[in-house]
Image: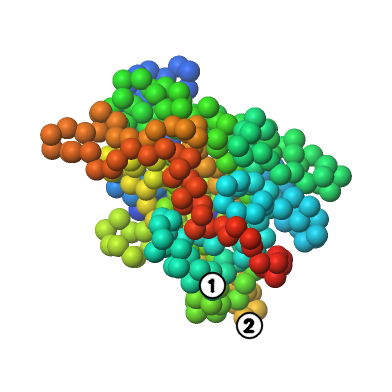
Amino acid sequence: MSQSNANLSSAAEASGIPIVDFAKWNSNASAEQKREIATQLTEACKTVGFVYIVNHTVSPRRLAEAFAWAKKLFDLKREEKMLAPHPNGPAVHRGYSWPGLEKVSNLMGDENDADAAKKARQVSDVKESYEIGSENNRDQPNVWLPENVLPGFREFTTEFYWECHEAAKVILRAMAIGIGLSDEDYFLESHSGHNNQLRLLHYPPIPAADLESESMARMPAHSDWGSITLVFQDDCGGLQVENPHQTGDFIAAPPLQNAIIMNVGDLMQRWSNDSLKSTLHRVGLPPLQDRFTGDERMTRARYSIPYFVSPEGQSIVECLPSCTDENHPVKHKAIVWDDYRLMRASMHYEDKPKENEATA
């Protein structure tokens, strides 16, 4: 291990975010071995809501290829990326989102939040992204670049999408065991993979002072809407997680080479009756000074690849029987995933984005 990677590993271990090793979770694993890993996973999800997962099923080689494709994508000219624009409005979350198009928040979508969302847009999120889903999802059709613009991109990302789903299936099985379900495949019945979302993210260099003064943002604090999220990070840093012991205080979640950093989404919190935590998180300044250059302290470009895992659109999400009893009454009413997704998305994307926001 290089000195740089050793430092990153030490930083991850010191962050307070647990590290769970899935090496023994395989076709030969005993029920006891699975239960041990599942318990470690859910204990992390009960306390922090975030966990590093090592020895998962996505190979280091494929991760390196994915980050290489992300860099090729975002290195394209603006007019080339705009050949696959994110559709107007919040309904379809696919294709290329230019800096300033999406405004991330934790607003829930009621009438009072609409005014707050407009105010939040006064501070732009300086990031760009590209969203990819299942080719068989008719409600969320993919928006692709022409093949000649980036040959091979579509083929790689559709394959990588399903490789991530295989990793997610293992984690969902462990989650089921960890919260006391008798059937480890319980969540797989509603998680076919066709409603997931692969996101390639690029945070361009920006003067540190712009983030420190809050005149611009990278990604403000929010919870994730779905079941679970798998995140792959480059070595830049900047991901921060709310301190489980102090509301409003955020701790660094440093990169750990080739690891998944997994977090609980809002739906899993509801299924578990709040025993698993959908934790607020954000992206800010890199924690290490060598990530800055020049008198303006320009941040280094950051790349990350989140994979959002969600059930079928009409899935009803309600407290599981194993997560409630006389001492733990049901805390949330049942919701339909599609309804909840659209409510949250309406706070992130405007129906008619401003043309002058389409700048790289």
If you read the primary sequence from the N terminus, does the residue marked by circle 2 or circle 1 appear first?
A: 1
Q: Position of residue 319 (x, y in %)?
A: 29, 35
The circle on residue 295 is 2
Residue, disc 1: 123
Residue 101, by quadrant, is: bottom right
What's the residue type where badge 2 is placed?
Asp
Tell me if residue 22 can be seen. Answer: no
Residue 73 relative to residue 281: left or right: right
Work out which residue is located at the far front of the displayed protein and give it: 111
Q: Position of residue 132 (x, y in %)?
A: 64, 42
Q: Nearer the viewer, residue 290 or 215?
A: 215
Mark 2, mark 1: which one is toward the viewer? 1
Residue at the image point whose x is 29% and y is 40% from the top: 333
The circle on residue 178 is none
Q: Where's the C terminus, which quadrant?
A: bottom right
Residue at the image point whose x is 36% and y is 20% from the top: 183
What's the residue type where badge 1 is placed?
Val
